[in-house]
Image (spheres, rainbow, N blue to C red):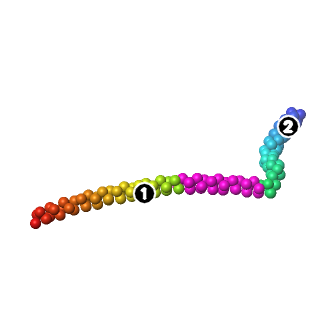
Amino acid sequence: MGKLKTYQEQLQEIVEKGINAAEEQQKKLASKPFEYAEKFENDVREYSVTTLRTRYYDYSESLFEQLRALNTRFGSFAADLVAKLEKEVVEGADEVAEAADAVKESLEEQKPAAKETTTASA
């Protein structure tokens, strides 16, 4: 019977060690969310709602100022492009007008010659 008692005690000791190891692991795992929550809580305490609001508004203001600056730059670029296109249109119109004048002069020069040919034919 003494041997059975020894086996029983050894078995209980093994189970106790297993329980202790499982408890230790469970405590380690369970502590992680609490550690993160405590860290988060400490970080949050560093900022007041007023401070967070001020930062938010500052970042928002900065963002919209950058967007306005970008819009101004885009407007300048667009104005330069429009001016260049208008200049090309005016130059093209001038060239067309000059060509039309040249055709008109050429036709006027040919009118007297055409009259002479018509008169001579009759």
Q: How crowded is mark 2: few (under 14 residues within 10 Å), some or many (20 or more)?
A: few
Near-viewer residue (31 or 105): 105
Residue 106 in view of the camera: yes
Residue 57 image offset from top left, x and y in percent = 73, 57
Which quarter of the figure is the C terminus placed in? bottom left
User: In screen coordinates, is 90 left or right of 6?
Assistant: left
Say few, some or many: other residues with alpha carbon within 10 Å of mark 1 (under 14 / 14 to 19 / 20 or more).
few
Residue at left offset 60%, top offset 53%: 70
Helix, strand or loop status at disc 2: helix
Q: Mark 2 points at which residue?
A: 13
Residue depicted at x 87% and y 34%:
6
Q: Return the x and y of residue 2 as percentages of the image width and height.
A: 89, 34
Q: Quadrant of residue 68?
A: bottom right
Judged from the image, the secondary structure of the residue bearing numbered disc 1 is helix
The residue at which mark 1 appears reads as: 90
Residue extending farthest right: 2
Contact between marks 1 and 2 (CB within 8 A): the answer is: no
The residue positioned 38% from the left and 57% from the top of the image is 94
Q: Nearer the viewer, residue 66 or 21?
A: 66
Magenta stretch: includes residue 63: yes
In the rendered view, would you say 19 is above or below 49?
above
The magenta span reads: 53-78
Tell me if I can see residue 41 in this picture: no
Magenta stretch holds residue 65: yes
The residue type indicated by label 1 comes to: Val
Question: Going by the picture, which residue comes out furthest to the bottom?
Answer: 122
Residue 108 against residue 33 in the figure, above or below:
below
Q: In which quarter of the image is the N terminus?
A: top right
Q: Position of residue 14 (x, y in %)?
A: 83, 37
Q: Is tag 1's residue or tag 2's residue first in the polypeptide sequence?
A: 2
